[in-house]
Image (spheres, grey):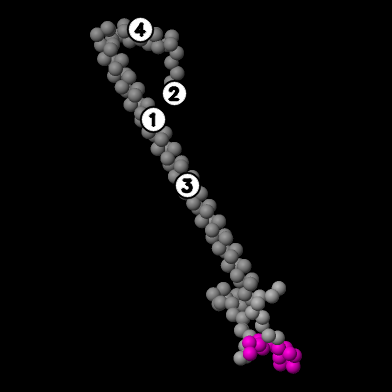
């Protein structure tokens, strides 16, 4: 703010003493001090308000960047889903694999059964 050296302050006090006189000088000094305090308080409140606004703007900018990244990630995910499904229908569920039929003896029928190969018995021991 304003820089006043000690010499300038003494010169200002002497001029004020000569102009105002010894009776009015203390009242004038109190008034000047109160005015300076109000100016400083006002300046500090303006500075704090500007800093708050800058913080709000920074938060808004970060939120917009996060939303943009989320939209980009969603678009990338949608594109990946379109590539995985050749018909381009992202809402259609993937077909479930068909279960192999099992006869009464616990033997699983396979495509090899149709060709005449011997069926294998499923082990309940968990082997391997």
Q: Quadrant of the C terminus?
A: bottom right
Front-most of 2 and 122? 122
Q: How many marks?
A: 4
**Is the C-beta separation of discs 4 and 3 under 8 Å?**
no
Left or right placement of residue 109 versus residue 18 in this view? right
* Camera-nearest label, 1 or 4: 1
User: Which mark sits nearer the N-terminus, 2 or 4?
Assistant: 2
Identify the secondary structure beneath mark 2: loop
Q: Which residues are magenta?
A: 105-119
**Is the C-beta separation of discs 1 and 2 under 8 Å?**
yes
User: Which mark sits nearer the N-terminus, 1 or 2?
Assistant: 2
Q: Which residue is mark 2?
A: 1
Q: Is residue 54 magenta?
A: no
Q: Which mark is residue 59?
A: 3
Query: Is 27 rendered above or below residue 116?
Result: above
Q: Which residue is mark 1?
A: 43
Mark 1–mark 4 Cα distance, whole angstroms, equals: 29 Å
Label 2 Cα crowd, 10 Å radius (few <14 / some 14-19 / many 20+): few
* Camera-nearest label, 3 or 2: 3
- Going by the picture, which residue comes out furthest to the front? 125
Mark 1–mark 2 Cα distance, whole angstroms, equals: 10 Å
Mark 4–mark 3 Cα distance, whole angstroms, equals: 53 Å
Left or right placement of residue 34 versus residue 4 in this view? left
């Amino acid at each position: 703010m304003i820089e006043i050296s000690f010499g300038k302050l003494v010169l200002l006090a002497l001029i004020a003493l000569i102009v105002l006189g010894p009776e009015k000088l203390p009242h004038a000094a109190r008034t000047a001090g109160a005015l300076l305090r109000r100016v400083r308080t006002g300046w500090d409140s303006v500075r704090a308000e500007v800093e708050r606004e800058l913080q709000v703007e920074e938060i808004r900018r970060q939120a917009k960047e996060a939303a943009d990244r989320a939209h980009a990630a969603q678009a990338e995910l949608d594109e990946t889903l379109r590539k995985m499904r050749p018909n381009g229908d992202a809402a259609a569920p993937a077909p479930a694999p068909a279960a192999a039929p099992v006869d009464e003896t616990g033997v699983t029928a396979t495509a090899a059964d149709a060709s005449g190969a011997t069926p294998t018995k499923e082990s309940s021991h968990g082997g391997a």
